[in-house]
Amino acid sequence: MNIPHDVRVRLDLARDLVGEAGKLALGHFADRAHLGVDAKLNGQDVVSAADRAVEVLIRSSVADRFPDDGFLGEEYGLQESRSGWRWTVDPIDGTSCFVHGLPSWCISVALSDAHEQTRFGLILAPVTGDLYEAVAGEGSRLNGQPIRVDERTTLGTGLVGLGASHRVAATKISAVLQALLESGGMFVRSGSGALSIAEVAAGRLCAYYEPHINAWDCLAALLIVREAGGFTAEFPGEGRSLLQGGPVLAAAPQIAEPLNNLIAHARQRAS
Ligand code: LIP
């Protein structure tokens, strides 16, 4: 691997931090009976003491080692960069699954440069132990083994991950769901956008779409898909700011156009 020094030293720290954070999160997961949980936007959008503790662990460790780096975390927001480097972290992606005792949650860490290019992405799913990793220009790996998107599947044979939240009108996702089913496709919703997008890179899902997702949910996973030979639509796209978030689409190359068309037609029908 030909990784520039500034990226390599941050990647080494990120690898250590996701391991530590995974252990911390699993401890809270095992002790959910005593886990403090607060609602944010609504009853489906929650934050737990585990989310906060994991973000504090990662944020404070990065600040100690690289005090001039920027940091965007789901729970404590944006600290501007003085070095040009910015860490984007979701301490627990899939918090709703986490608090309900479901296994589909993960820790997501991305590093971006001064040109807003994601340079590495790491996603750890502590319950399964699956560690997804990509370094820009160096491919994607799952548990150390190279991964590629599934270039054989079609919309009629593959599974499409769909994300849903109350941040957007229900029709923005129900119209796409209806069109996908009518076209002979099928969907899954895991509750963790990061993990589902990473599963596109591993060839487990043929695509992932969500009408609104946040940067901390998806930046790491989108690089992992691109480095695994997949297509990712520009994020957050259409002049949106990183803090606003936006729609996300990640897909195997042969799926991208038909799925994009299906989404466009569905949204037209719904409007
Ligand atoms: C979640 C995302 C998911 C989305 C949920 C939620 P969180 O992130 O991963 O794709 O559908 O509404 O935003 O809040 O669990 O970190």
Image (tube, helix red, strand yellow):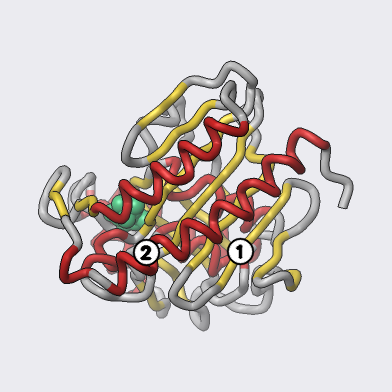
Residue count near mark 2 (Cα–Cα under 10 Å), binned few <14, some 14–19, many ≥20: many
Kindly identify the residue that appears in the image at 41 percent across and 61 percent down. 24
Say above or below: 172 vs 183: above
Q: In the picture, which quadrant includes the C terminus?
A: top left
Q: Amino acid at mark 2?
A: Leu
Q: For this view, does 47 lie left or right of residue 62?
A: left
Q: Amino acid at mark 1?
A: Tyr
Q: Residue furthest right?
A: 2
Q: Residue 38: give x, y in percent of width and height.
A: 14, 50
Dot 1 or dot 2, earlier in sequence: 1
At numbered mark 2, what does the secondary structure look like: helix, strand or loop?
strand
Numbered tag placed on residue 194 in the rendering: none
* Residue pointed to by mark 1: 132
Residue 75 or residue 233, whichever sits in front = 75
At numbered mark 1, what does the secondary structure look like: helix, strand or loop?
strand
Say if residue 50 shows up in the picture.
yes
Kindly identify the residue that appears in the image at 67 percent across and 78 percent down. 152
Distance Cα–Cα, label 1 vs label 2: 20 Å
